[in-house]
Amino acid sequence: MPDPRCILHVDMDAFFASVEQRDFPELKGKPVIIGGKPDQRGVVSAASYEARKFGVHSAMPLREAGRRCPEGIFRPGRMQAYRQASRHIFEIFDRFSPYVQGLSVDEAFLDVTGSLHLWGDDEVKMGEALRAEIFEKCQLTASVGIAGNKFLAKLASDMDKPNGLTVVPREAEEIRTFLAPLDVGRIWGVGKKTKQRLAQQGIRLVGDLQNAGKPQLVKWFGQSSGEHLYALANGLDARPVHDREPEKSISNEHTYTVNQDAREVHHQTLLRLSEKVGRRLRASGYWASCVQIKIRSDQFQTYTRQKQLAVSTRSDQEIFDTVLDLFEKFDPPWPVRLLGVGVSQLSDVPVGGDAQLDLFSPPPQPKERKLDAVVDGLRNKYGVTSVKRGRWDLET
Ligand SMILES: [Mg+2]
């Protein structure tokens, strides 16, 4: 049965670089590269389409960009201006649907199922109206993908870039045909490693995945990844568009009945809190990119410390390691009244820097993740206290 939803994925074209070209007309038609100077460390955060012709793309080291595009115009970037443009775009999104899920400053999913009738149930008309309004109000172009789910909509917005609109058919067989000729790397979450593993099995196109069938994919990739891969290869994706109020953070805290100054007690408390947070995080389906602790003194002063992770996580161990590190660096000299552990910057795909990670490749600590899943399963079945992980890394 076709997905009854209508999902738009809107992606601004070379956003930062386009804002530069808009605000400084002398840059129009020129290879503009945002991120810094070519002799600086760091990476390209955006490249205009003129620069992309030289093989420059975002996340590429600036030095490499300088080599590939010597006549490029390198700019440090004006975050203030980009944020303002982003606000204007999202105001427009809000007028088209109450269900808007921002993925970054220049990209969002809109579930327009309930507002499509305002455009006479004509999704192309609606998509073009959205693009026209963005251009009119911001002098920037956007590419739009329209489909019955998020995966297909995102794929579609990329098909006719820049300044394009692509509609994915809705019937199962048409969707399969639409996907079949695409490279497997186009599947959301299939990165380099999964691509290599698939290539070893002779699978290069999405159509090859479709033909391999579910049992074979489960055999190769395990139950959950195999099924996920098969579903995506057939264009199935039930994830909802999380609207404006997704969980912003997940946290747990503990107040001691008697103020504590024993370090080992704090470590045990932090471990327990990390596991609680990790469990809720996994149940929510999110990955977290930021971990924080909260420490309240016996004098009721509250301190928070946080750490940005290079790669998002949902592992108890990684949360705990980060928490422990933050706690040890803070090292409260006074008795502690309350401890809290939290995670924030939640996303429904694993992220590392600004790049999507490989969903199906072995995670950094495969054993650890497996253990988390096992422990979660037992706890859901028998209650929270049934399984307690031993501490192996600290002397007691
Ligand atoms: Mg973009």
Image (cartoon, grey):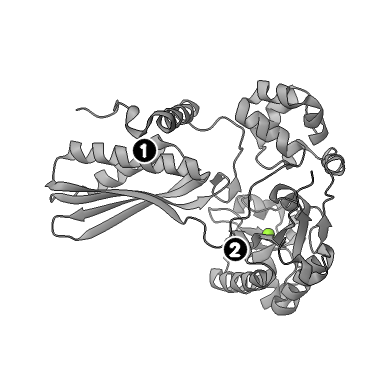
Q: Position of residue 147 (x, y in %)?
A: 77, 53
Residue designated by label 1: 275
Left of 348 or right of it: where is 152?
right
Where 122 sits versus 212, above or below?
below
Q: Give neighbour class at mark 1: few <14, some 14-19, many 20+ (Cα, 10 Å).
A: many
- Quarter holding the N terminus is top right
Amino acid on which the number 2 mark rests in the picture: Val
- 4 vs 388: above or below: below
Q: Quadrant of residue 93?
A: bottom right
Mark 1 secondary-structure assignment:
helix
Mark 1 / mark 2, whichever is N-terminal? 2
Q: Is residue 47 visible?
A: no
Query: Which residue position holds label 2?
Result: 105
In three-dimensional space, the C-alpha distance between marks 1 and 2, rounded to whole angstroms, equals 32 Å
Q: Residue at x 71, y 36 (%)?
A: 231
- Residue 364 point in image, percent of width and height: 50, 32
Q: Check disc 1 and give the amino acid type.
A: Glu
Residue depicted at x 19% and y 36%: 264
Q: Residue at x 55, y 44 (%)?
A: 350
For the residue pair 87 and 383, the one nearer the viewer reads as 383
Left or right: 359 with respect to 274? right
Query: Is residue 218 or residue 261 the one in the foreground?
Result: 218
- Residues at badges 1 and 2 in contact (C-beta under 8 Å)? no
Q: Secondary structure at mark 2?
A: loop
Q: Nearer the viewer, mark 1 or mark 2?
A: 1
Q: Nearer the viewer, residue 78 or 328?
A: 328
Q: Quadrant of the C terminus?
A: top left
On screen, residue 139 versus residue 175, left or right, reads left
Q: Position of residue 130 (x, y in %)?
A: 75, 70
Quadrant position of ligand 1: bottom right
Quarter of the figure with residue 84? bottom right
